[in-house]
Amino acid sequence: MNKEISPIYHLSIAPMMDWTDRHYRYFMRLITKKTLLYTEMVTTGAILRGKDRHRYLDFSPVEHPIALQLGGDDPLDLAECSKIGEDFGYDEINLNVGCPSDRVQSGAFGACLMKEPKRVADMIESMKKASKLPITVKHRIGVNGKESLEDLVSFVQTIYDAGVDRIIIHARIAILEGLSPAENRTIPPLRYDYVYQIQKLFPNLPVAINGGIIDFDSANLHLEHVNGVMIGRAAYENPYLFAKADSLFYHSNDPGYSREEVLQNLISYVQSLESSGTKLHHVMRHVLGLYHGMNGARMFRR
C-alpha cells in the first residue's frame, strides 16, 4: 500500500472529555501556536443523529492544527463523520480505541475495540476512502486478556496494513472491568518500552507516546525513541508549560504572550461570545492553572 506522509507533530495535547473543548483550545492557542490540539471525543451518533452537530464540531480558525477525535464502531458511520470533519476544516481525524469507560464500552467502542483488530482495520479503511485527511488511532498498549507485546504488535500490524497514518499509544493497558477511567490512568503500570519497540518495528509509521508525561525534559527523552509525545493532564493543570513548546519542539522564534497578555487576549474572546449565550465560567474554568507553581497562584484561582 502506498502511504502518504503524515504530518509530523512532535508534541500534542491529549483529547480529554469535559476539558479540551473549544474554549480551552482557544486559550491554549494563545500559549502555543504549533502544538497539535484535539477535540474531546465526539461520538458518531452525536454527529449523525444529534440535533446540533455545530455544537460539537465548530471551532475557531486559530485552533489549527486541530484533530477531530471520533468515537464509534460502525465503519460507514465513521466514514460519514470523517467526511463531515473534513468539510468542517479539521486537519486530522482520530479514532478513539483507548477510552475504558463503561459508557463507551456499552457502545462497543473505545478500548474494547483492541480485542477486535480486524474490525478496527475495517473502520480505518472506510474512513480513508471517505476522507483525504490523515486518519490516526489513539489506543492503549493492550487490554486485560490481551496485554502482551505480541498482542500489541499484532494489533498495530493489522491497522498499519489498513493504512493508518499515525498512532498514539497510551503506555498502559486498559482494565475493562473493575477500574474507573481515572484509575485506568494511574493504576496499570506504564510500559514505555512497549511503545519504543513498536516504533522500532514500524519505522515508517509515526508513533506518539502518551501516559504519565508531565514535563518537557521527559518529553525530549521519549523523542529519542518515538516520533511524538502527547501530554494530557499536565497540559490542563499547568498550561503555561507550553509557552516554550514552539521554540523547543518546532524551532519557532516567536516569543509568544506573557501570562498577562494571555488574559488580556481572553477578554476580547469572551466579549465576542457574549451574544451567543456563552457564560464567563465556560471559558475561565480553563484558566485556573495559568499561574501554576508561582507565588500567588492560589489567590489567582480564587
Image (tube, rainbow, N blue to C red):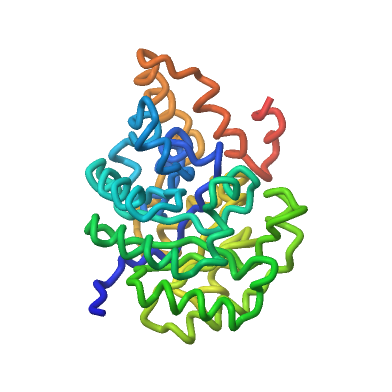
Q: Quadrant of residue 219?
A: bottom right
Q: Residue at x 66, y 29 (%)?
A: 301
Q: Is residue 175 left or right of residue 210?
A: right
Determine if residue 232 is in view: yes
**Residue lying at the far bottom of the rendered structure:** 201
| Image quadrant assignment for residue 144 | bottom right
- The residue at the point 46 percent across, 57 percent down is 12
Vertical position of residue 20 compared to residue 137: above or below: above
Q: Whole-percent x and y of residue 255?
A: 39, 51
Residue 80: image location, x then y, percent: 29, 47
Above/below status of 169 relative to 49: below
Position in image of residue 252 (x %, y %): 35, 59
- Quarter holding the C terminus is top right
- Left or right of 191? Residue 95 is left
Q: Toward the viewer: 116 or 159?
A: 116
Residue sitting at x 38%, y 20%? 273
Q: Is residue 203 above or below residue 217?
A: below
